[in-house]
Image (cartoon, grey):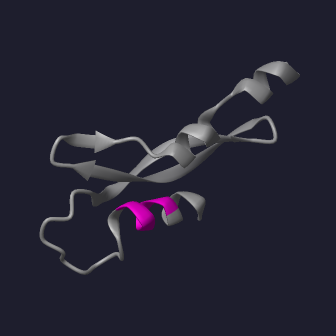
């Protein structure tokens, strides 16, 4: 839900066509996130611009394994 909110903020509403909008939704891809020290599979949205793909800040935060490494 947090990643979807970030994508909506970056790209606007899902289906309206807006010429000149720099970022677009671009499918979903399999990934994983760390929750309570466990790595869980998820599907994350992709965002692209004319220059290529863009990383989502929320996904990068969820990917951090620092807490999991500390517990080990």
Residue 34 falls within the magenta-colored stretch: no
| Quadrant including the N terminus | bottom right
Locate residue 26, reporting x and y percent.
28, 57
Q: Where is residue 16, by image quadrant?
A: bottom left
Residue 7 falls within the magenta-colored stretch: yes
Q: Nearer the viewer, residue 19 or 40?
A: 19
| Quadrant including the C terminus | top right
Locate residue 66, reporting x and y percent.
73, 25
Give the residue drawn at x 61%, y 39%: 61
Residue furthest to the bottom in view is: 16
Q: Where is residue 67, by image quadrant?
A: top right
Apparent side of residue 15 relative to residue 69 in the rendered image (left or right): left
Which SS type dominates the magenta stretch? helix
Vertical position of residue 23 compared to residue 72: above or below:
below
Residue span colored magenta: 6-10
Vertical position of residue 29 compared to residue 3: above or below:
above
Apparent side of residue 52 relative to residue 7 in the rendered image (left or right): left
Locate residue 48, reporting x and y percent.
26, 50
Give the residue drawn at x 28%, y 79%: 15
Apparent side of residue 57 relative to residue 22 in the rendered image (left or right): right
Residue furthest to the right in view is: 71
Residue furthest to the left in view is: 19
Give the residue drawn at x 38%, y 60%: 10
Locate residue 60, reporting x and y percent.
54, 38
């Amino acid at each position: 839900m947090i990643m979807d909110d970030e994508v909506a903020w970056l790209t606007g509403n899902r289906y309206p066509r807006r010429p000149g909008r720099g970022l677009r939704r671009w499918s979903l891809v399999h990934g994983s996130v760390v929750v309570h020290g466990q790595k869980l599979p998820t599907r994350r949205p992709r965002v692209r611009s004319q220059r290529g793909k863009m990383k989502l800040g929320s996904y990068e935060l969820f990917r951090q394994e620092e807490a999991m490494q500390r517990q080990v």
